[in-house]
Amino acid sequence: MLKPTGKTNPQDPTSTIPSLSVVTSVYRSERFLAPFIDEMVATVEKAGIKNYELIFVNDGSPDESLPYLIRAHADNQRIKIVDLSRNFGHHKAVLAGLSYAKGDLTFIIDCDLEVRPGVLQRFLDTLRETDVDVVYGVQEKRKGALVERTGGALFWRLFNLLSDTKIPENVLSERLMKRSYVQALLSLGDRNVFLGGMMYWSGFRQLGIVVQKTQREGASTYSFRKRLSLLLEAVTSFSTAPLKVVLLAGLGVTLLAMTVGIVLLVRKLLHPEAVLEGFTSLMLVTIGMAGMVITVLGIVGLYIARIYTQTQNRPLFIVREFHD
């Protein structure tokens, strides 16, 4: 089955709707796939769920992840593979998986085993015991080295400071969702995708539970450049605060310049013989103003770029092949 765009996969009314869909994205994940599949299958079956599907989204992984998944699919027809045409990024890959998920419940989890698949049982128990639509994971304390912990905490604090959409600072990717929530998430139509913001902006009743997360084996695929790019994407997608800040800064500089100009003019009128000196100060002011103008244009340009991306209306992802 070939699905060339990022639109929601049509439901087949003749097919049996799964009770659970497990969605995970795959990028440089070959070493994790075998234990992840074994643990995930064991966990789902131990939970008493017989009708389920495991959806793997190949996000242009350059290793042997896809060939391995194809072999696993041949042995286990519950494994579905959404093979993207290239690397579109983790957030868009997850949306691709959600668009193919048919389950009454959908569970998102990373396949790198930082969070073990066995945690699914707690998510199921919490959802059954409470009247919520979403159960999401949070970590009690951020993992990793000082730089990683500080960078992660700073990311969420800056986002929450600048955005009206508030997100728990230690939130994880793992979450169990009812079908109505997944459909609402897919209906948003954002082309500038920041999945964390979209998940909380959409509302519904959501509850967090503490989940243990270990250190990933091997280097993380999220570099500093990717984290910075994600922060810019997040802030400009869910906040107009930077535009308000530069507006206030511009008004402040303009007021300061007018005040200084009036002072110099009054001084010249009262003391015509006075020579207005201060070439160095004038140059500093000129350079400062030029820097501010460039900064303002850069911030405005980011928002214009977001508008341009949204109006292009390109699909979020392109699926090369779907292994059902």
Image (cartoon, rainbow, N blue to C red):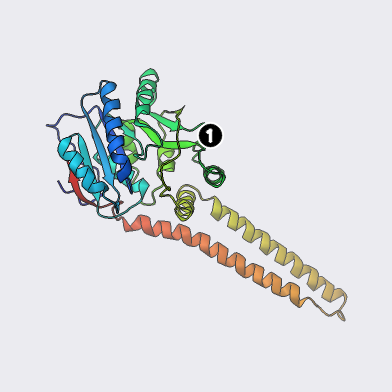
Which residue is found at the position 70% from the left and 74% from the top?
283
| Label 1 neighbour load within 10 Å: few <14, some 14-19, many 20+ | few
Q: Is residue 30 visible?
A: yes
Residue 42 position, x and y percent, is: 27, 27
> Which residue: 41% across, 46% down?
218
Q: Is residue 296 above or below residue 46?
A: below
> Residue 277, relative to residue 246: is it above or below?
below
Q: Position of residue 285 (x, y in %)?
A: 69, 70
Q: Which residue is drawn at the image coordinates 67% and 64% (left, top)?
A: 254
Regarding residue 10, the answer to whether it shows in the image is no
Q: Say which residue appears at 48% left-offset and 33% top-offset.
A: 139
Residue 193 in picture, x, y percent from top left: 38, 49
In which quarter of the view is residue 149 placed? top right
Question: Which residue is outermost to the left?
Answer: 14
Circle 1 residue: 141
Local SS, label 1: loop
x and y percentages locating residue 97 in the rendered image: 28, 41
Q: Three-letter amino acid code at disc 1?
A: Lys
